[in-house]
Image: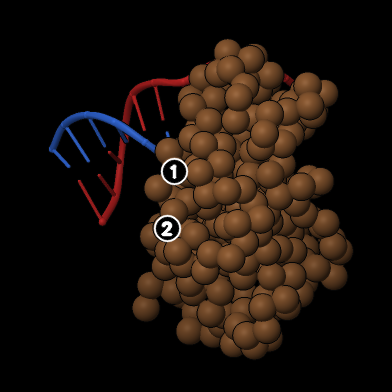
Chain colours: A brown, B blue, C red
Amino acid sequence: MGMVTDNHQSIWKIYQKLYFTFGSQHWWPAETPLEVMLGAILTQNTAWKNVEKAISALKTKGLLNLNQLIRVSPQQLAQLIKPTGYYRIKTQRLLALIRWLHEKGGIEKIKYIPTPTLRAALLKCYGVGPETADSILLYALGRPVFVIDSYTRRILSRYGIIQGDEPYEILKEWIEKSIRLVIGDNTRQLVSVFNEFHALLVQLGKKYCRPHPQCYGCPLAAD
DNA sequence: GTCCAGGGTTCGT
DNA sequence: ACGAACCATGGA
């Protein structure tokens, strides 16, 4: 009903077309899971180019590890992440996530927490909403969850696959189910496809699916 | 100058 | 449950 199509196959067709058009996106561009987690906060409503500046500044200061981050001053942190905008509130969000991770005993410990439990725990962290939580679960921790963002809504609604205003969880589970119906329940394959698909939608969105669109040359337009 | 970027929280209704 | 205001820098 809410979805325009009862055919989950259309999601897979879009994924395939994007993958064969743009190729592998090699997400997330980070060296460690911790770096992904910090980046997930820093990129909220922010161009990735600005996040790179902040990550680079943190790296230069030797702060890209939990032992240093747990004792960094909010003032220094705010100074270093300034290029990402919202730097005061993002400082609080980073500190909340850092403290949570430290209390849990670090990345090596949370590896063993089941995905639903972990997702609920992440969502309780100040500044971590559904998209940030799912980005962390997928790109930092390799869990088979799909990330919904504004590009996903814009692109899929513009092509009539969805209405666009569905609640986050509804869209997430519908797309996860669509992919599972095609490729099955193998976790490694699901993670691989969810990883590429979200990155490809962002790539397409940046190039061809702007808020006020012209969409010239969009590879999905030929259908 | 205006609009947007790899969102989330808070506070009205 | 939904909408609007708010956060703030940098590039097009």
As displayed, is residue A33 above or below residue A47?
A: below
Viewer-proximal residue among A99 and A87? A99
Label 2 is placed on what type of residue?
Ala
Specify the subunit that label 2 lies on: A
Sequence-wise, the earlier of marks 1 and 2 is 2
Q: Residue at x 60, y 24 (%)?
A: A71
As displayed, is residue A94 above or below residue A154?
A: above
Which residue position is annotated with label 2?
A120
Q: Secondary structure at mark 2?
A: helix
Viewer-proximal residue among A64 and A159? A64
Residue A131 visible to an observer of this rendering:
no
In the rendered structure, the answer to whether residue B13 lies left or right of residue A96 reads left
Q: Are marks 1 and 2 on the same chain?
A: yes
Position in image of residue A136 (x %, y %): 61, 52
Q: Residue at x 63, y 15 (%)?
A: A76
Position in image of residue A117 (x %, y %): 45, 64
Specify the subunit that label 1 lies on: A
Q: How many marks?
A: 2
Which residue position is annotated with label 1?
A125
> Marks 1/2: CA distance?
9 Å
Label 1 is placed on what type of residue?
Cys
Q: Residue at x 62, y 79 (%)?
A: A179
As displayed, is residue A33 above or below residue B9?
A: below
Position in image of residue A203 (x %, y %): 74, 52
